[in-house]
Structure formats: structure tokens, C-alpha cells
Image (cartoon, rainbow, N blue to C red):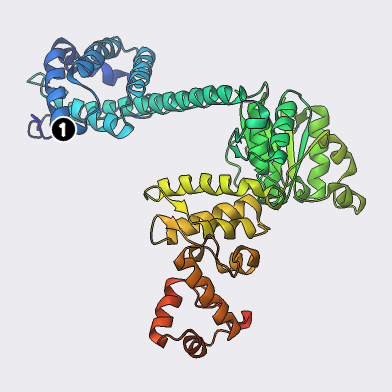
Amino acid sequence: MKHGNQPAISSTPPSPPRRGQPRYFHLLWEEDLEELRPVLKAIKDRRVEVVDRWHHLYVLHFGDSRTLSEPEFRSIFESALERNQNDLLRGDMDAYAADLHRLGEILAEHHVSLQEIIASLHLFEEAAQSVFPEGLKDPTWVYTTFDRLSHIRIMLLADSYVRSQSAMAGARLHAMEREASKIAPEKRERFHGIVGSSAPMRELYRRIHAAGQTRGTVMIVGESGTGKELVARAIHFTSERANKRFLPINCGALPENLLESELFGYRRGAFTGATQDKTGLLKAADKGTIFFDEIGDMPLALQVKLLRALQERECYPLGSNDPVSFDVRVLCATNKDLEKEAREGRFREELLYRVNVITIMLPPLRERADDIPLLANHFLRKYEKSLGRGAMRYSKGAMRVLLGYAWPGNVRELENTVERAAILAETDVIHAHDLPEKLHGAAPATTPPSGAGMTLEELEREHMRRVLTEVKGDKVKAAQMLGIHLSTLYRKVQRYRLEHAGEPAAAKPALQPA
């Protein structure tokens, strides 16, 4: 955006090449700041003029969508510009970085978006160039070097802004959680991201809170999709380590050699491709919490090494003879019967005793069906927002189908089902026919012959599904039984997504390989 007062390229010989490497973000040499002194001084001396032009460009660029009023803009940037230029004239990049860090915090507090900040910094560059002194020895070099300085400014501000936004979000979250913790356990519907108000869930909240107040190792046991990592995070955030790191690792998702290097780290040259040292997760989580998801899938050889590391509170990075100490809270999760696995030699008994100090059992969704409406609406709010849809709801028939299904995939399956329905629904109401066919077949009790509480559309769909099932998917016979034209049947079959209703499983078209 440098279309202001840039002069034509000068024929003046370029400045001599620098020695070594640029220091500041690999963009500037120390002597660059000294050679920019005339420009930096001009910006400082004429900062009111610069801010005037900068604000003018800001208004032209953002119009009514701009965040800052003129008094706010001048109050923030005039003083900041004077401090910044003084820092640069002294060659004090540490002070310059600190000032920009504070500026980023101020802009975050004023809720200025990151996109607006970055665009505004480019507008500043254009405004600043309008006061560059005439007769520069090497104009091309000056403009190029000032541009590199602008890149440093953007990086420092963006880093500060992102950190401030994260800190403010964390503070708001902790404030909300403190308020939530004041709610009586028997009235809680949510707890640290977990949703549920049934008796089993309120007992779970109590156990999570109790586990958070201890330092013991916790084993979280539950079927796939029950939310074991959410429970682990809740334990972490109710513990004395809440302000430290929470690092999860899926023991079944990585091959043994990669899992070992992730846990313990490695030294440069330990193996082909190890071009630099890497800190292992046990050390990276120091003073915080490490979560071993699906620990039952960890290879036996690595279980021995992990047991020793947990006992000694130290580990050896690959390629190193020097131990690295760590202090972590250990949480584990499994969907297996680890006692049976230990008896059959697939899990180290000593490690089981080490990690199974406190056991928390998670109820499957079928055992807390009262939470299905709460969960279904929670996920619907989530996806209607991400999909850009208006307020959505479920018909009575759709909710009846959700309540009648056994949910073998638990909460994860319910969430995926809600997301699919929110995408496919033609209106803001999710009907029974927007839900997968397998839910209907598994829940015959939710579609009583009387049709009580069902909409006319849902009654029609259910009647068509039963007729198609009776005639084993024969569309001609179904149209005759229903007394409608075949084309009408096909149209309604497509609308209600009944293309495969009544067909035997083998008759359904197989997926073609990619």
C-alpha cells in the first residue's frame, strides 16, 4: 500500500552489504536503525500530522465498520507512536517490543479485530511515508528497510494481541466456572464442558470435583464416545494445576517408536531425521497434567519404560544418557477391562497398579437417556451457529426417535447425528425423516400406530416406510397400496430419504472405492 509519495528509483549506489545475519526477526541489522534515524526522527517530530493522515486513511478504509472512534484512535496511537519512535531512536528494541506488547493488549481490550489491526498498520506505513524527509541518500533502501521494520511491528503486535485475547478468554472461562461451581450439585446441567443433568451425571460431577482436589493418578473408564477426555480436562481444571499445561496423547494412534519419542523426547542425531533436540511430553507437561488416552493400547515394551519413568519421576530422551526430571499429574483413560488385559498378559500388572489409584466410571448414554434432549439441543446450538443457520429445533417425532435409539456410539454418535441433521434439514425444524434410517429401525416404540404427538408429515413418512418395508422396497407395489401415482411415490421417497426403505441390506448399492 505504498502508493503515496514514493520517489522514483534512485540511481544512487546501494548501501554496502551487511556482515553476518539480521538480528531482529532475521529482518534488520543493528546499524539499519541508525541509518533510518532521519526518517524515525521525522515521524516523531511530525507525529500529529502522521496520526491525522493515518486516521483519515483509517476512516476511508473501514468506514462505518471501524471499531475506534476518533478520540479513541488519537488517544491510543499518538502516545504510542511517540514512545515507539523514542525506543527506535535509542536503538532499544527490547523497550520497543514491550511498548508494542502493551499496545496489543490495549487494542484487544477495545475489541479491535486482528484483521483491522494489521490493515491499520499498513495504513500507518503509508501515512508515515508522507513525512519522510527529502534528499534521502538511498530512497529505495530506506523504503525497503522501513517496510521490514513494519513487518517486525506487525509480528510483535499480532503476538501480543493473540496472547491477550487468549488470556481474556481464559479469565472469562474461569469466572464462568467459578460461578458454575456455586450451583448446587443436584441442579447442575453443565460442568467444565460436560453436559448432563441426570443422576448419574451429577454423581460424576461430584467424583470429578473430588478427584481434582487430590494428587493421585486417575483411571477414567468408559465406552468409546462417552467423553473421557472431557472428564480428564475437568479434573485438571478443578485441580491445583489448573493454570499449567494439560497435554493429551492417544496411545493407540501412534506407532511404538514415534510414541516413545513423543513421550520422552530425543536429542539431535538420535536417529535419522533428528536434526534438533525435542522436549518430550512428560517434560513439556512439567507442573501440569498429562493424559494417556486409551492407555490399554500402549505397546508392552513401552509400558515398562513408562512405569520406570513414573516411579522415578525422570526419563531418558532418546540418544541421551542424562535423565530429565519432571513433575506431572497423570490421568489415564481406557475402554478396556485392564484387569482382564493384565491377566492375559497384554497389560503390565505393575503399571495398572501405578495408574489405577482412583477409578471414575463413565455411564454410557443409554443409561442416562434423560440427558438426550439436553445434549441434542446443546449440539444443535453449536452447529446452527457454525452453519450460519437461524434458530433450529426438533419436532416431537424427531425427539422421540432420538430418545428411542440405544446410541452404541454414545455422545459422539449423537453429536455426529445432530450435525448431519442440521446440514440436511430443509427448514429450521429437524423432523424424524432428517435423521438416519438406522435410528428409525432401532426405535419402533417411538412411532406408535396412533400417531399421537406426530406431525402430519411425520405420519405420512412413517406410513410410507412401513408400506415399503412390507413390500420389501418394491416401489410399484407400494404406489398401488398407497393409491398414488408412481412418480408421486418417487418424489416423496426422495423427500423423506426412504430410497432404501424395505430393501434387504445386500440390495443396497455398495460404496465404490475412491
Residue 297 seen from this side: yes
Q: Is 147 left or right of 355, judged from the image as shown?
A: left
Which quadrant is home to the N terminus? top left
Instruction: Identify the residue position indicated by label 1 in the image.
Output: 63
Residue 266 seen from this side: no
Q: x, y percentage for residue 261?
A: 68, 42
Q: Secondary structure at mark 1?
A: helix
Residue drawn at point x = 79 percent, y = 33 percent: 309
Question: Could you say which quadrant of the image residue 507 lies in?
Answer: bottom right
Q: Please tell me which residue lies in front, 30 or 198.
A: 198
Q: x, y percentage for residue 271?
A: 66, 45
Q: Please tell me which residue lies in front, 375 or 136.
A: 375
Instruction: Identify the amino acid type marked 1.
Output: Gly
Q: Is 325 left or right of 188, judged from the image as shown?
A: right
Q: Is residue 145 above or below residue 334?
A: above
Q: Please tell me which residue lies in front, 512 or 497.
A: 497
Q: Which residue lies most toward the right here?
A: 343
Q: Is 281 left or right of 167, judged from the image as shown?
A: right
Question: Could you say which quadrant of the image residue 441 lies in?
Answer: bottom right
Question: Could you say which quadrant of the image residue 60 lies in?
Answer: top left
Residue drawn at point x = 16 percent, y = 32 percent: 63
Residue drawn at point x = 55 percent, y = 77 percent: 501
> How many badges with numbers are in the image?
1
Q: x, y percentage for residue 462?
A: 53, 71
Q: Is residue 39 above or below residue 389?
A: above
Q: Is residue 36 above or below residue 251?
A: above
Q: Is 235 left or right of 192, judged from the image as shown?
A: right
